[in-house]
Every structure is written in structure tokens, then in C-alpha cells.
Amino acid sequence: MTLPETVLPGDSLADSRPGAQWWRTAVIYQIYPRSFADASGDGVGDLPGVTEHLDDLRTLGVDAIWLSPFQRSPQKDAGYDVSDYCDVDPLFGTLPDFDDLIEAAHARGIRIIADLVPNHSSDQHVWFQQALAAAPGSPERARYIFRDGKGADGELPPNNWDSVFGGPAWTRVVEPDGTPGQWYLHLFDTSQPDFDWSNPEVHEEFRRILRFWLDRGVDGFRVDVAHGLVKAEGLPDYSPDPESGSMGGDEANVPYWGQEGVHEIYRDWNKLLAEYDGDRALCAEAWLPTVDMTALWVRPDEMHQAFNFAYLETEWDAAALRDVVDESLRAYPAVGAPSTWVLSNHDVVRHASRLALTAENPQGHGIGPDSPGQPDPVLGLRRARAASAVMLALPGSAYIYQGEELGLPEVIHLPGEARQDPTWFRTDGERYGRDGCRVPIPWHATAPAYGFSPTGQSWLPQPEEWESLARDVQAADPASTLSLYRTLLAARREHRLGAGTLEWLDGYGDDVLAFRNGDVTVIANLGEAPVELPTADLIAASEPVTGGILPTDTTVWLRPA
Ligand code: NOJ
């Protein structure tokens, strides 16, 4: 689709003109607040820590920040269990800290996207506590999904659904009179009861929450489990394929994912956001089986972006990548939306390890010392750099997960007692879960906790090898991954690649991805055989290139000589 006239192609940074639709081309940096920077020294990252490092992000060259949850929460699922949607958790700071952050970010032309968790609350949310204290059938219970159990005494769960984190998706409550009672649904941990979105009160409450943060100046929301809010009528039994990724998505017709009714909610939110200035945006976290299904979330009157998990899940294979890029550049523009691109986030094995795994590893399972197919770290980093150089050349909006610009690998050797992901506990250690991609990031090689925290504390232990990956070491090294990202992001901006058009170039062989985006030619060699490069000037290379020969697992950006 052609962009509206008001779009400023390419350079979205600091463009707050109405209609600029910055999210079409933006590079958005995901901050996982607990692991980014700890200003208070308690070993957990916080909002003042983010504010302190905004200039580093400005230097990196990102347009926006997505903050994973910082709202008040007992932290049973690292903040994805919210007990008060309109407050900052003391672990991360205060509302004034948030206001300071947003002001300082906006002053640097960096937008802020907040995480919104509408599928479930924490069990410590006042509504859920009221529901527990109230009787079956009460309006308090009607905000969540309470049902009587099956069996003579209601001792069996209402259906056979499993939680994403393992174990049953239902927990039985003790009624206020002390007797065993109803069951409540939690697609995730027992501490995360699902809201009942057939209840208008839930809609009203989330409109209030959206307005609360929009009034404070957020530029948009990343919407958690955006495919899960509405459940199929009657809650029919369903058994997923045990090999499918745990956030859902490999199968169609799942009674709790991708139900038609969910779209009404986003149409409503779309209108609400449109009341605000500055092109506020919604991004769907929706794990769905196909690109075409995901595109339904970004129809013109719904969300603005959806994470491209099909791209993230594509293996390091030229033909497969070409297919998913083609599909994405067909399906999203067909509904008027940009494609997004993403390789890592806080739920998946970091791509500097994932791209070198030699065994199947379904999303959410993670890797630990006993996992099959352990990655070769050198190969993983090499592929990650090449993959990032492909991703950042694609038209649309790209997401970067904190630490990938340092080439951080998944941390495999975390002691069991340090692990905190509910997946690890709910599967009795059978799945390692997601802690390995959430380890606090290194800033200064020689500082305590590599500069993550002034006291040297860190809520997950950082590996010794990370000294050489610290940001200050990499900033001084032109061959580092950080320098590569800076070069790529600057060139992406200069050549307006986000707003560009992709044209495949043939003739380089089956193991090569070659395309042109505007005046930039990108060639990525995913095969073993060296590839001869055309005569051109080099803009960027993921590995040193000499003699006009592109080695294996390397990407270059070229421009006409
Ligand atoms: C998706 C989030 O990204 C993940 O971290 C969380 O555990 C689940 N949703 C539940 O909120």
C-alpha cells in the first residue's frame, strides 16, 4: 500500500507531526527493566537506571523503547502478573520516576511504549481478592473465569486445558466458608487468573488503564497475549501438540487463542488511541500459526503492528528466510500495515545461541546444561551478526532486544536455585524456561556486576565471559557487535531502509539471500561456499571481507561504487 502523504519516510526519530506514523519504520529497543540497569543497587534494574542510559540508546540509534512491565506486581512472572495497572512497582521506582523517564526520552526524540497485560492480572489484584471473598455467581467472580468443577463433588477441573507454563490451567479455590469450591482459569501461572472479557466491566477498566498511561505520555502499548483474551464459548476440551511452542501458535482452532471476538476489543482501543495526538500505536504479541492469521490483528481499524514471530522462528536457511520475508511483505501491506521484524526477546533463546542449536528447541523450553544440541558460541555469534544485518535492512519496523547489540548469548549454566521462570518450577525442571535470556546486561568490564548495579548485586548471576562483551569494551572496538549495530542503524536511517521496497537479486546461488532496498544492496551468505561480490562500496559487513569474497555466515551492505 502507498503511505499517506503525511508519512515522513525513513527517519522516524523525533518526528511527532500528526500523521507521521512513526511506527511504520521505527527501530524499537526492548528494555526488560529488571535486567537493564540498576540505579538503586538492589540487584534489580529500575526506571532511573533506564533514564541514566538514554544517551547510550540515542547513540545506538533507536527510535523507541518498549518497556516490559514495570507496573505494581508480586513478580511471580517477572511483572507479567500485575496487581495494580496504574502504579509503578517499588522494585522499579515510582510514578515520578516514570514521568522523568518519559520526559527525558522524549527530549531525545525517543518514544516510549509500555507493556499492557490484559489477558490476566495477578492473583493479588484487588479484583481477584474480591472475587475470592465473594460467592459463586457474584459480580466480583464474573470479572474472571470461575467455573464449577466436574465430578460428583466438583473435584475435577472444568476442562482439560493445560497452562502454557506446564500443569493444569485451572486451580480450585477454597470458598469463604472453608469448603472446596469453584475453579478459576489461568492460561499461565496459578498467580495469573484470566479476566473474563465477555464482561463489559473488564472492557471499561482497561479503557481507564489505557487512558491513564496515554495521559502520562506513552506513545503506545505492546499488548501481551493479544491472541488470548477471548475464549471459545463453552470452554471445550483441547489438547495441544506437546512439541508446539508454549506461547501457543503452531496450531489453528485452539479454543483459547485467536478467537474472532478478540478483534472487537482492538477496534475499540484503536478508536481510543486515535483520540490522542502523536500517533500512539498498539503492537500485538500474538503467537499464531501463520503470517496471514497474524495480519488479522493489524487490519486498519485494529492494532498498528504485530510481532513477526514467523520470522523469528525461521531457521538459518536462505530459502526459508526468503519465503517468510515474501509472505510478510505480502500479508501485512495487504491490510495496510508494515511488517515488523524481530530475532530475540525475553521469551526466546537469544539468537546468538539459537541460530547454532543443533536440536529442536520449542519456544519456552530454554536451554540448560543438559539440553541436547548445545550451540557453538562462535558460530552462533557469527550467524547472529549476519542475521541482524539482514533484519535491519528490511523495510518495516524492527525490534531489538536489550543485549543483542552486544552479541550476548543465552546463559546456559545458570544454577537451578537461581532460576526464577515459573516454567522451570511448573515443569519440575524439565523445561529450563526463559531465565537464560534475561540475565542482567554488562556495561563496564571492570565494574562490579559489569556496571549493571553499583553494589555488584544481580538478580541472576552474570557469566565471567561477559567481561569481554561489556558495552565499554565494545564501544572502543570498531569490529565489535555494538559497532556493527551502530553502523547498521545509522545506515538504515540514512538510506531510509525502513520505508523502502525490497527487490530480490538472483544469481548468487541457493544459499544466498541477496536483495536491494533503495540504493543499498544486501548480500548474505548462509552457505559454506564463498561468494563473489559485485564491485561496490562497502557500507557494513558482519565479518571482515577481503578480496571481494563473501565468506560463510556473513552479510554485507553495499552501495554502487
Ligand atoms: C507473554 C510474555 O512475553 C511472557 O513473558 C509472559 O510470561 C506471558 N505473556 C504471560 O503474561
Image: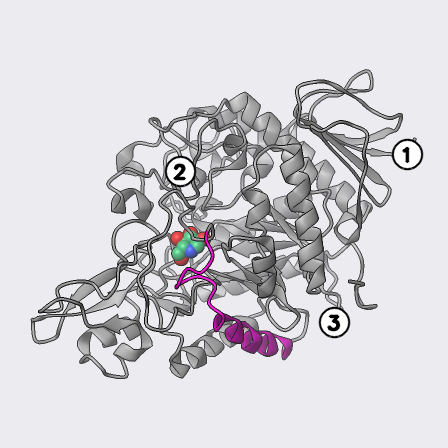
Find numbered disc 1 in the image and state the secondary structure of the residue it sits on.
loop
What residue is shown at x 65% (from left), y 25% (from top)? 553
Whole-number angstrom distance, CA of label 2 to CA of label 3:
42 Å
Can you identify the residue that label 3 sits on? 18
Quadrant of picture, ligand 1: bottom left
Instruction: Classify residue 25 as left or right of residue 210.
Output: right
268 displayed left or right of 246: right
* Residue at point 18%, 64% (across, down): 172
Q: CA distance from mark 1 to mark 3?
A: 35 Å
Q: Of the residues tagged 2 and 3, which is closer to the observer?
A: 2
Viewport quadrant of the N terminus? bottom right
Instruction: Tell me the residue that label 1 is attached to.
Output: 560
User: Residue lying farthest right?
Assistant: 561
Answer few, some or many: residues within 10 Å of disc 3's Cα (few below 14, many 20 plus, some between 14 and 19). Answer: few
Picture layout, residue 135 above or below residue 253 = below
Point out residue 148 in the picture as x, y percentages from the top left corner.
19, 72
Which residue range is magenta in the image? Answer: 251-275
Name the N-terminal-most of marks 2 and 3: 3
* Marks 1 and 2, the one that precedes in the sequence: 2
The x, y position of residue 139, in whole percent, is 28, 84
Looking at the rendered structure, the kind of residue marked 1 is: Pro
Between discs 1 and 3, the one toward the N terminus: 3
Up/down of 263 relative to 449, above or below = below
Q: Secondary structure at mark 3?
A: loop
Q: Does residue 52 appear in the picture of this structure?
A: no
Residue 429 found in image quarter: top left
Assign the C terminus to one quadrant of the image: top right
Number of the label disc, if any, that sits on residue 366:
2
Is 319 left, or right, of 253 in this rendering? right
